[in-house]
Image (cartoon, rainbow, N blue to C red):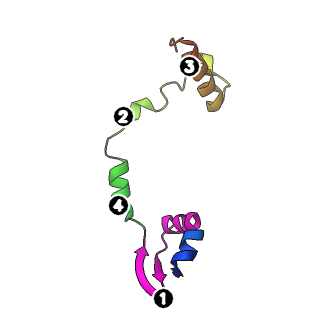
Amino acid sequence: MTMNVSQARQRFLELVNRVYAGEEFLITKNKIPVLTISPIRKENKIKKTFKRKIDPKIFGMWKNRKDFKGMSTIEIADMLREKAWKGNYDV
């Protein structure tokens, strides 16, 4: 898609979201192409994001705790934050 600099400036957030979704744009100034905006290849994003391996044992480490029975994950997180805020780190 092509748009001029003024349109790109006015709709910058929309432009960024559409580029993130995979679209490419040609930006012109006085009907002369001056730049293209295109997404970064996804392979590069994935490599940078997941450099470290995550230990699968950490997932579900509190899954079977009796004091968390019947609580949603949000309630558990709120309770743990409150305990940490008060300085009670015995979880």
Work out whether residue 49 or residue 2 is closer to the camera in this orientation and state it.
2
**Residues drawn in magenta:** 12-38
- The residue that label 4 is drawn on is 43
| C-alpha distance separating marks 1 and 2 | 53 Å
Q: In terms of sequence position, does the residue under pointer 2 or pointer 3 come before the other? A: 2
Separation of marks 4 and 3 at Cα, in angstroms = 39 Å
Q: Is residue 23 above or below residue 72?
A: below
Residue 50 x %, y %: 36, 47
How far apart are labels 3 and 1 at the CA level? 65 Å
> Who's the residue at 52% across and 65% down the image?
16
Q: Earlier in the sequence, mark 1 or mark 2?
A: 1
Q: Which residue is mark 2?
A: 55
Residue 21 image point, x, y percent: 51, 66
Residue type indicated by callout 3: Arg
Find residue 86 and report its image quarter: top right
Quarter-of-image position of residue 17: bottom right
Mark 4: amino acid: Glu
The image's mark for residue 31 is: 1
